[in-house]
Amino acid sequence: MSDPRITSSIFTRGAVDLSALRSTAPADTRPATPAQSGPPTGLPGSPVGGSAAVIDVTEANIQTEVLERSLTTPVVVFFGAAGYPESDEFAPVLERLAAEGGGAWLLARVDVQQHPRIAQMFQLQAVPTVYAIVGGRPVDAFPGVIPESQLRQWIQAVLKAGGVSVAEPEDPRLVEADDALMTGDLDAAEAAYKKILAESPADVAAEAGLAQVGVARRVAGADPRAALAAAEQAPDDVEAQLLAADIEVLSGLAEQAYRRLVDLVRRTAGDDREKTRQHLVSLFTIAGPEDPAVASARRALASALF
């Protein structure tokens, strides 16, 4: 499974023996409380809108709600406690994603202050810690917190391990950035894409969005017809050719833009050639590395350079 964790898996060190939970978890002898009406005292957060995808775990129900439930539905176990800032901040994120999942996976919350024996059984080493239980056994875990984008990837990997196929919800941060781009608020779009990339440096969609912001800035105020005509009249004018290529990309003529700049690379040298190459590579980013036209243009660029 994909691995956005911040440390190596504790399961590779044999830290957890869930058979102990099956056989030794005692009945909860404390007075019964309406556990499902709210979180145990001290546990950060609360089930989102009473979501059935979020439950609170005790020694009395861990057998049925975690181990047995995981035989049919992947279970993500969150160990947290009030007073731990990371725990308080991370719990609501997990709860929201569980609600978004619509029952594809279950979030099981453990208050380590109220249930230290469960924490001991899992040999907990940090608060917060998140476990994934599939088929009655742990498949992965991470201590501490990770960015939401990485958490979504981790959950998708857990679902895959559990044989669940679901469409990944849209990243709301990306939706916000795209909306800003579409409405022409380039400053807001740029800031939003950069924020995503700061958390997830390899986010292809954010890279593409940021590249589109650059193109939009460069063509702002330009007359498309006049710019293309000027480029036609001055084939060796680097600035004119770069602007024309930007306009072609925004007009849906990306392949034409790629050919224009590859030809310009062949005709130029020194700083002009390097500037053209960098500009072309930035345009590749918009379409993404899997686009066939990009792959073809990259080969043509390599040929022009070498």
Image (tube, rainbow, N blue to C red):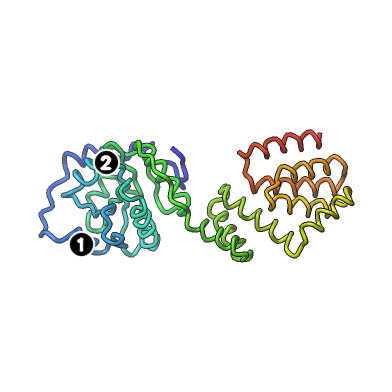
Residue drawn 18% across the image and 49% down it: 61
Q: Is residue 51 left or right of residue 146?
A: left
Residue 126 in view (yes/no): no
Residue 141 at what x, y percent from top left?
A: 37, 44
Residue 229 at what x, y percent from top left?
A: 84, 54
Q: Is residue 108 left or right of residue 4?
A: left
How many other residues sit within 10 Å of disc 1, few (<14), some (14-19) or many (≥20)? few
Looking at the rendered structure, the secondary structure element under dot 2 is: helix
Which residue position is annotated with label 1? 37
In the rendered view, would you say 84 is above or below 8? Answer: below
Residue 155 at what x, y percent from top left?
A: 40, 46
Q: Is residue 59 left or right of residue 264?
A: left
Residue drawn 16% across the image and 61% down it: 34
Residue drawn 69% across the image and 52% down it: 251
Image quadrant where residue 195 sits: bottom right
Residue drawn 52% across the image and 56% down it: 174
Q: Which mark is residue 70?
A: 2
Task: Point out the image quarter for the C terminus.
Answer: top right
Task: Point out the image quarter for the N terminus.
Answer: top left
Residue nearest the viewer, comparing 32 with 208: 208
Type of the residue with mark 2: Ser
